[in-house]
Image (cartoon, rainbow, N blue to C red):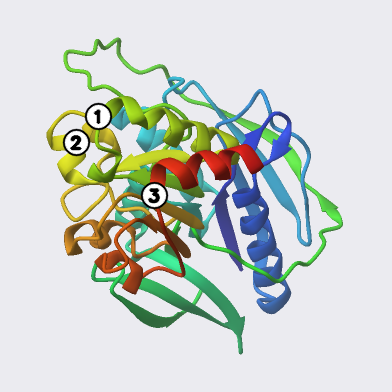
Amino acid sequence: MSTIAAFIDFKSGNLTSRSIQIINLVNSIAKNFSELEKVCFYTLDSNDAVGINTSIPSTLIQIKGLQEDRTISNSQLSEIVNSIASNNCTCVIGYKSAFIDHVLASMAVHVGLPVITQINSISIKDKSIHLRQSIFSGKANSFLQTNLSAMFILNPAFEFIARDEGTSKASNSELQISASLPYSTILSTQQGHGASLVDAAYVVGAGRGLKDPSNWTMIEELAAKIGAATACSKPVSDVNWRPHSEHVGQTGIKIAPKLYIACGISGAIQHLAGVNGSKTIVVINNDPEAPFFKYADYGIVGDVFEIVPEIVKNL
């Protein structure tokens, strides 16, 4: 018999949209794999956790004791991995984040199973799991077939369309982990405002076309309107217009949101390497020959200082 462990999140007392995708995926797996016995849902959001329904017996395990920023010590990591292993979970699912990367990599070593990263989509047929995986910085896709014995790290843009309503209510449990040793921060970097860039489903990026850092106000307003994170090209962070934590590209952060809006970015290959995993790309640039238009799903040729405020006004 098999058991799945899946990491989900809550916000303001509700499941996040990504968590709903994971529950849909788990329900579909249960429907197609009769050997699946139960599911263990792990969450760090103990204050917001609410009841969930699945199509097979499940337990909602609230992890308590972590720091608010979700940093994790080696001893805490071992306690979480041991909990997953004690529930006989040989399949673990979660959306990409620093926390998930740590846990799934450690779990894979613990049980001797592979980690499959950058998963864009999953289909289930003939008692097999078929994956589409982003490779080469999003320039190509790899198609894999596997079973329930693996660690699955989902791209931020991952979606699972099939929906099977669950009728089995998850029981509640807690995992109280030991406190980490006291620590202090000896180096800090400026962080951008808004949603977390790595995990954001929507991202608004801008480049040197904004001409001055003071003009970023309209980018932040647009991001706030749609609940997006803000990003920038490397030249912008190099001159300290924006923090390096917002630098997206080959040598910066690689993102795969559902929507990426690029404002005043020409589209150099180094920047494309960081964003071409995006599901939909919208480019706003006054140069009709800008390379970015070749890779955009939608392009707007015009003055970013006129177009962005107009978009904000009409949202």
The residue under label 3 is 303
> Horizontal and vertical percent for residue 103?
38, 45
Q: Earlier in the sequence, mark 3 or mark 2?
A: 2
**Regarding mark 3 in the picture, which secondary structure is present there?**
loop
> Horizontal and vertical percent for residue 167?
86, 57
Query: The residue under label 1 is which amino acid type?
Result: Pro
The residue under label 1 is 243
Circle 1 crowding by C-alpha within 10 Å: few under 14, some 14–19, many from 20: some
> Horizontal and vertical percent for residue 221?
51, 31
Q: Are marks 3 and 1 in contact (CB under 8 Å)?
A: no
Residue 21 image-quadrant placement:
bottom right
The residue under label 2 is 237
The span from disc 3 to disc 1 (Cα, nearest Å) is: 25 Å
Q: Are marks 1 and 2 in contact (CB under 8 Å)?
A: yes
Q: Viewer-proximal residue, 304 or 251?
A: 304
* 68 to 292, vertically: above or below: above
Query: The residue under label 2 is which amino acid type?
Result: Ser
Circle 2 crowding by C-alpha within 10 Å: few under 14, some 14–19, many from 20: some
Query: The residue under label 3 is which amino acid type?
Result: Asp
- At horizontal 41% and vertical 16% (from top left) the residue drawn is 179
